[in-house]
Image (cartoon, rainbow, N blue to C red):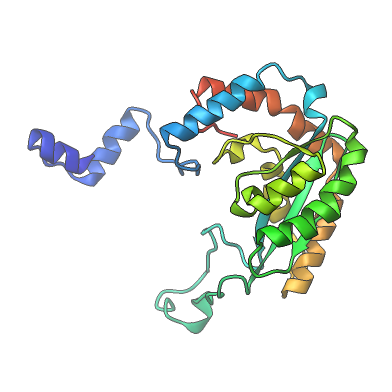
Amino acid sequence: MQNELETARNVHVSALTVRRRLREAGLISRRPIKAPELTRAHKVARLRFARTHENWTIDDWRKVLFSDETRISLKSSDGRQRVYRRRGEREAAFNFVPHEPFGRGSKMFWAGISFNGRTELVSIHARAMNAEFYVENILQEHVMPYAPFIGPDFVFMQDNARPHVARVCIEYLNEVRIEVMNWPARSPDLNPIEHLWDTIKRAVRRYLPAPQNLQQLEYVARHEWENVPQPVIENLIRSMPRRIQAVIRAGGGNTTY
């Protein structure tokens, strides 16, 4: 804003003055909400999905298995880790946080939730999950056995990650006759399991004693996953009609979910 005033009106004011005027107008600095960048095509697809499911009831959403992957780190990765030090101790060795190489300090998990249950929390041991791993270790081992639990109207929700839309994956799902929801890209706000991942990650960070290695991290994550009350999952899925309406009101844009 300081630069724009200088360019548009040739008026120079300090950043402090800008902040003061904003504060006087009732505008207070807040952390922005993180959301995927959406192109017009993304917004059109999201709005189309919302319109298609606008009249779905909770009974309709009961038949869906919502799935997703997430990465959980041994050390907090939210950028808010703080240290307490005295003046002059900035460069002391104990004030540095070591940088962990990708994958060494974290573990990837997959899981699915539905109105009346959940799958196991699956630890993905492969360095990078490809389509073959996804078919053999996720779809065959966990999605297929779960389908009868929901019933003949079972619908599988997965996002548009590359392994999910690979030909071998699509062919397998067609072969076993599993209906896959046509999920719009860049729509984590529509997937209720995303909120559950946040809950699990916060619980892992609060766990005492804190996990010190990946084996302990996996144990703690499984423990927290298994102890999430099912009514919590039910409430997340009950929010689907509200999520759909939020997308419609946003014209396919990002929502606060």
> Can residue 253 be seen by looking at this rendering?
no
- The residue that appears at 53% across and 64% down in the rendered structure is 82
Quarter of the view holding residue 2: top left
In this figure, what is the number of numbered marks? 0
Q: Quadrant of the C terminus?
A: top right
Query: In the image, is residue 91 above or below residue 195?
Result: below
- The residue that appears at 63% across and 27% down in the rendered structure is 243
Left or right: 4 in relation to 120: left
Looking at the image, the residue that sits furthest to the bottom is 93
Looking at the image, the residue that sits furthest to the left is 10
| Residue 51 place in picture, x, y as percent | 60, 20
| Residue 123 place in picture, x, y as percent | 76, 63
| Residue 160 place in picture, x, y as percent | 60, 45
- The residue that appears at 78% across and 73% down in the rendered structure is 215
Query: In the image, is residue 225 above or below residue 24?
Result: below
Seen from the viewer's position, the closer of residues 170 and 10 is 170
Q: Quadrant of the N terminus?
A: top left
Seen from the viewer's position, the closer of residues 113 and 81 is 113
| Residue 93 place in picture, x, y as percent | 49, 83
- The residue that appears at 92% across and 39% down in the rendered structure is 149
> Can residue 57 be seen by looking at this rendering?
yes
Left or right: 76 in relation to 68: left
Quarter of the view holding residue 181: top right
Seen from the viewer's position, the closer of residues 58 and 200 is 58
Query: In the image, is residue 219 above or below residue 37?
Result: below
Quarter of the view holding residue 75: bottom right
